[in-house]
Structure formats: C-alpha cells, structure tokens
Image (cartoon, helix red, strand yellow):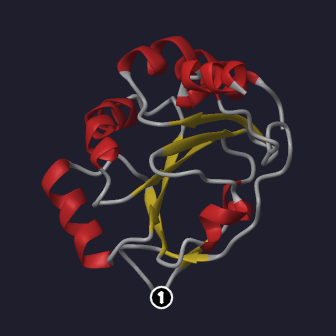
C-alpha cells in the first residue's frame, strides 16, 4: 500500500491518463456565454483544430494560466480556443473575462457540470486538444504554463494543422 501511495504522490496532475485520447470528442450543445440564445457543439468545429479549456471564475489555478491563454490566443494560427465555463455564474464569468482579457473565440456554459462529466473532467482547469476530425488528441490537467505552450501545445497544434481532414 505504501508503494502505491508513494507512486501516486509523485504523479504530476498533467500525467493523469485520459480514456478519451484518439476518440471522438463527446457531443454537447451548450449556450454561449455572451449569447445564451445561441448554442455551440463540437460538430460546429469539424475541420478545425481547437482547444477546449475548462475554466471558472472561482478557480485560483485558472487565474494562474489565464495570461498564458491570452498570449496563446494572440498566435492566431495556433487554434480556435473554446472555453467551457464550468459550474459558474454567467455574470461572474463575464466579469472575469472583461477584467482579465478574453482568450476564447467562444465560451459556453456548463452550470451543472454535465458537459464536464461527459469529458472526464477531474477539476479545473483542464485543456483538451481536438483535431480536424473531432478526435481528442491530448488532455492537460491543471494550469497550462508557458513551457507547456512551447514544448507541448504549439508543436502539437502545428502538427495537427498540417494534417488533412
């Protein structure tokens, strides 16, 4: 038992394996944060490489990664960035984005956490990379760092952008 505990304590949160890798992104239809009368689903993004970032205004770690996501968003060729506002109040989420900047091409609401459950979310923040075919190619648990962007995300996004549909 002590061996398993020691191994578990040495795992990095980003190393948690996902059963969704190379599988189709779970479907949803969610209201957009800025236009609740409009909905977005993964089918709307077919043919595009996109990031799916799970975030919340109450999340301290989300604040830590937010500047990194804002910088990544400036690299327009990288990918579409979709935010999943998780178990949050829409007014709090809108204030957060207004005050800290908005890296998302679009953000959708998951007030009850059902979409997060379908995607296997352990907590926030988490970021998924989805290819042009709608397959999840990578999952990052925890805040994204500048090193993660340079060493993992940008090379992967470049590779996926070069792939045909």
Residue situated in front as seen by the camera: 37 or 162: 37
Q: Secondary structure at mark 1?
A: loop
Left or right? Give the position of 143 relative to 30.
Answer: left
Left or right? Give the position of 26 relative to 150.
Answer: right
Residue at the farthest left position: 99
Left or right? Give the position of 39 relative to 161.
Answer: left
**Residue that numbered label 1 is attached to:** 37
Position of the N terminus by quadrant: top right
Residue at the farthest bottom position: 37
Residue name at image x 43 percent, y 53 percent = 105
Residue name at image x 24 percent, y 58 percent = 97
Residue name at image x 68 percent, y 28 percent = 161
Compared with residue 72, is residue 24 higher up or lower down, i.e. above or below? below
Q: Position of residue 40 (x, y in %)?
A: 59, 70
Left or right? Give the position of 56 relative to 162.
Answer: left
Q: Position of residue 47 (x, y in %)?
A: 74, 47
Place residue 153 in its image quadrant: top right
Q: Position of residue 85 (x, y in %)?
A: 43, 64
Position of the C terminus by quadrant: top right
Q: Position of residue 58 (x, y in %)?
A: 28, 60
Residue at the farthest front position: 1
Q: Give the number of marks.
A: 1
Residue situated in front as seen by the camera: 26 or 79: 26
Neighbour tally class for label 1: few under 14, some 14-19, many 20 plus, Cα within 10 Å: few
């Amino acid at each position: 038992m002590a061996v398993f505990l020691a191994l578990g304590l040495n795992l990095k949160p980003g190393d948690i394996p996902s059963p969704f890798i190379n599988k189709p992104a779970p479907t949803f239809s969610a209201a957009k944060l800025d236009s609740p009368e409009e909905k977005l689903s993964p089918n709307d993004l077919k043919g595009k490489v996109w990031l799916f970032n799970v975030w919340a205004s109450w999340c301290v770690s989300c604040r830590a990664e937010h500047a990194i996501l804002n910088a990544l968003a400036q690299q327009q060729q990288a990918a579409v960035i979709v935010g999943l506002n998780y178990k949050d109040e829409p007014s709090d989420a809108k204030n957060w984005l207004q005050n800290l900047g908005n890296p998302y091409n679009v953000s959708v609401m998951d007030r009850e956490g059902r979409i997060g459950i379908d995607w296997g979310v352990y907590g926030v923040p988490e970021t998924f990379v989805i290819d042009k075919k709608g397959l999840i190619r990578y999952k990052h648990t925890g805040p994204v760092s500048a090193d993660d962007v340079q060493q993992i995300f940008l090379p992967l996004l470049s590779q996926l952008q070069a792939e045909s549909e």
